[in-house]
Image: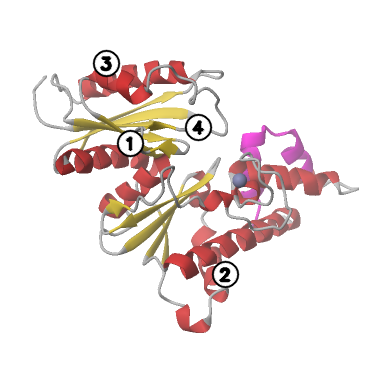
Amino acid sequence: MSSTAPYFLGLETGGTKATAAVLDHEHNQLATREAARPAGATAQDTISQLIELGRAVQTDAGLENPPDAIGWGFGGPVDRQQNKPAYNFHESGWDQLETNPATQLEAALHAPVYVENDCEVAGLAEAHLGAGSTEGLTFYMTLGSGVGGGLIWNGRILASGPLGEGEIGHMKVVAQGAQCACGQLGCLEAYCSGWGVGERAIEAINSTEQPTPLMKVISEAEPRERAKLLFAECQDDLFAQDQAEVFLDHLADACANVGLLLAPKNFVIGGGLSQLPWLVDKLAPRIESRLPELMRGHMDVKVAQLGSVSVPCGAALYASQRVAKR
Ligand SMILES: [Zn+2]
């Protein structure tokens, strides 16, 4: 049955999928929908896909009227002044579009569109609806194919820079270390993202004279599967354990630096690698051990609760806050 009721639409474009969610004014999820991103899609293809997805999820929710507002969580830095995606390290073309993509979405879906970074809106969703809090500071980190972060202060994105903030993935953890997709050396993302874990494992395998059966499996696997295959063997395999130690140490260095700089009450970790069953138990004490004794025990490290809907739900929430402010 179709109806008309006020609602907010949230959209996400990440590395491998596009998602959409409809939230009512009480932040209840009315519908969600996901679509795979076709390989080789251009920025303009992605905008067409978002328009289709937005219309489809609106139909799923049984709604005929346009949303009150639309939020878009973009997988890369955004230009906040111009309200548009700035660039994406893995997908070209976002800085060359003739018409601002937000303007294109507004025309097709008949509502104001607000663009924000995907980690920032995922953090907003976790603060309001998941593992974070709307009181004080929540730091959200995604640990997946990339590593990103967002800061939520008293239930709102703490927007301090024109291109965003909280870029923990590009914090340096190794001086003159491995090459990162951003052009810099030694970034956390080059060691602790899915692809980073895989590349570092391959480096270690290539310097070994007698590869073990697991090393052969990792070498022959698809790059994006390597981290998952490796960490699944941490219980029994020495090589997997060594790689996990390196991963945890770099991650703990970066997280401790965030703790020292910002002292968030909640440190929420989302993304595919946050699902490693041992992650928080092994990471939290390492972070604490890197803090001066007096400063320990004040930051709760937690796994995110909202899973794959955190970005579109957070984007819808962000849109609701932006229109309320107008
Ligand atoms: Zn980087």
**Quarter holding the N terminus?**
top left
SS under mark 4: loop
Seen at 57% across and 63% down, the residue is 252
Residue 86: x percent and y percent? 46, 33
Q: Between marks 3 and 1, how big is the CA–CA gap?
A: 18 Å
Residue 227: x percent and y percent? 63, 44
Q: Which residue type carries mark 3?
A: Ala
Q: Is residue 26 left or right of residue 200?
A: left
Kindly identify which residue carries mark 1. Answer: 312
Foreground mark, 1 or 4? 4
Foreground mark, 3 or 2? 3
The residue positioned farthest toward the right in the image shown = 209
Q: Between marks 3 and 2, how big is the CA–CA gap?
A: 49 Å
Q: Which mark is residue 87?
A: 4
SS under mark 1: helix
Is 258 placed above or below 34 here?
below
Q: Which residue type carries mark 4?
A: Tyr
The region drawn magenta spans: 215-236
Closer to the chain start, of discs 4 and 3, is 4
Res 229 visible: no
Is 228 placed above or below 99 here?
below
**Nearest the eye: 150 or 9:** 150
Q: Quadrant of residue 224?
A: top right
Q: Which mark is residue 286?
A: 2
Closer to the chain start, of discs 1 and 4, is 4
Kindly identify which residue carries mark 3. Answer: 108
Q: Is residue 224 left or right of residue 302?
A: right
Seen at 28% across and 19% down, the residue is 56
Q: Between marks 4 and 3, how big is the CA–CA gap?
A: 23 Å
Seen at 36% across and 59% down, the residue is 138
Residue 75: x percent and y percent? 46, 35
SS under mark 3: helix
